[in-house]
């Protein structure tokens, strides 16, 4: 009886330990609508709340995402996936956000699920050296490619929450020496291959801050830079995503104590033609934007932007939605 009782106690302890690990890996937050006290709707411009257009983007609402018990923050990388937004945190977690919209306008968030990115042994990644996840994109086989800084690497996850596999993508071999906190910030994949950028400014005389890897070919170094005011401010790429027509939408970020935060969205078409769609600088709503996701629906192209608050009380986690509109076409009301 003592042996049996001890076995039951040990078995129960193991189950409790497993349950605790699962709880650490997966957290579900309740929905938050626009009438929730936790949700703050933000205009495109605090100075002119009626403003609905900037450049070739029409503003479709934005929210200041609550921290939710310190679990939501540090967001980098963003994708539209299975009817939800999927982001990474820079402490090795994935965050899936169900958005609430009314007439295409972003008005709140539904269920938010977070979980840990795992290591090769199935353990949650911890610490900045191992767990500074910054960018994600779908791999050609339907998995997820995730880029990490500090310990610069790209891993493939069959599904987020499962054990990873190493890849042949070597950031240091592709870009040379990388600063600890300036590795691959941008990953974008489509059926032709992979586009990746290091977080560095690049001008016309540089070797290139991005890599275009077409299946079956050697990597090609590419220079991408802001096409508007952020060029002079040293804007660096922080995310990108492909549309179905092959257009790559690139997000650039800049910051200086005098100018504050800035963001620019650039469209790069398959003919390598580039144009700035919009620039966000004060007094427009802007923060440390590090994530961009493309959503296509009903013949329209939407862009979501998310900012990284660095878990700092002086920054915000902003989630904004825009529709891409043709040049010189007035925004529809």
Image: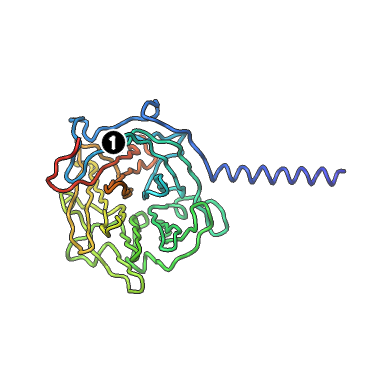
**Relative to 85, is 129 above or below?**
below
- The color scheme shown is rainbow
Residue that appears at 50% across and 63% down: 165
Residue 325: image location, x then y, percent: 20, 46
Q: Residue at x 30, y 65 (%)?
A: 211
At horizontal 35% and vertical 58% (from top left) the residue drawn is 187
As drawn, the residue found furthest toward the left would be 328
Quadrant in the rendering for residue 237: bottom left
Q: Quadrant of residue 202?
A: bottom left
The quadrant of the image that shows the N terminus is top right
Dot 1 falls on a residue whose secondary structure is: strand
How many badges with numbers are in the image?
1
Horizontally, residue 94 falls left or right of residue 258, namely right
Q: Position of residue 121 (x, y in %)?
A: 57, 58
- In the picture as drawn, the residue positioned furthest to the right comes out as 1
Is 71 displayed left or right of 276 in the figure?
A: right
Residue 100's place in the image compared with 122, above or below, is above
Q: Nearer the viewer, residue 152 or 258?
A: 152
Decide if residue 176 is in sight here.
no
Closer-to-camera residue (195/286): 195
* Residue 11 on image: x %, y %: 74, 46
Q: Which residue is mark 1?
A: 61
Q: Is residue 1 above or below residue 140?
A: above
Q: Quadrant of the C terminus?
A: top left
In the rendered view, does 45 fall on the left or right side of 25?
A: left
The 10 Å Cα crowd at callout 1, few under 14, some 14 to 19, many 20 or more, is many
Q: Is residue 170 visible?
A: yes
Q: Position of residue 275 (x, y in %)?
A: 17, 54
Outermost residue on the bottom side: it is 217
């Amino acid at each position: 009886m003592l042996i049996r009782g001890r076995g039951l106690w040990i078995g129960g302890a193991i189950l409790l330990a497993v349950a605790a690990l699962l709880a650490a890996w997966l957290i579900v937050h309740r929905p938050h609508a626009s009438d929730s006290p936790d949700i703050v709707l933000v205009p495109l411009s605090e100075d002119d709340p009626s403003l609905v257009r900037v450049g070739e983007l029409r503003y479709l609402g934005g929210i200041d995402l609550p921290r939710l018990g310190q679990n939501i923050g540090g967001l980098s990388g963003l994708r539209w996936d299975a009817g939800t937004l999927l982001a990474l945190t820079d402490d090795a977690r994935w965050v899936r956000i169900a958005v609430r919209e009314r007439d295409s306008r972003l008005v709140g968030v539904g269920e938010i699920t977070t979980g840990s990115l795992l290591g090769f042994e199935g353990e949650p990644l911890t610490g900045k050296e191992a767990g500074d996840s910054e960018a994600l994109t779908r791999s050609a086989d339907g998995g997820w490619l995730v880029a990490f800084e500090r310990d610069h690497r790209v891993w493939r996850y069959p599904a987020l929450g499962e054990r990873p596999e190493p890849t042949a993508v070597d950031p240091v071999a592709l870009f040379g020496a990388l600063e600890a906190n300036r590795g691959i910030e941008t990953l974008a994949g489509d059926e032709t291959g992979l586009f990746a950028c290091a977080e560095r400014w690049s001008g016309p005389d540089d070797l290139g801050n991005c890599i275009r890897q077409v299946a079956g070919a050697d990597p090609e170094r590419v220079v991408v830079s802001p096409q508007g005011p952020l060029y002079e401010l040293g804007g660096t790429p922080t995310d990108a995503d492909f549309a179905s027509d092959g257009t790559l939408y690139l997000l650039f970020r800049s910051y200086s104590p005098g100018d504050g935060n800035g963001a620019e969205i650039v469209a790069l078409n398959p003919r390598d033609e580039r144009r700035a769609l919009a620039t966000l600088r004060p007094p427009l709503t802007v923060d440390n934007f590090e994530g961009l996701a493309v959503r296509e629906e009903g013949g329209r192209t939407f862009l979501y932007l998310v900012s990284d608050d660095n878990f700092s009380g002086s920054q915000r986690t902003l989630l904004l939605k825009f529709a891409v509109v043709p040049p010189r076409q007035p925004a529809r009301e």
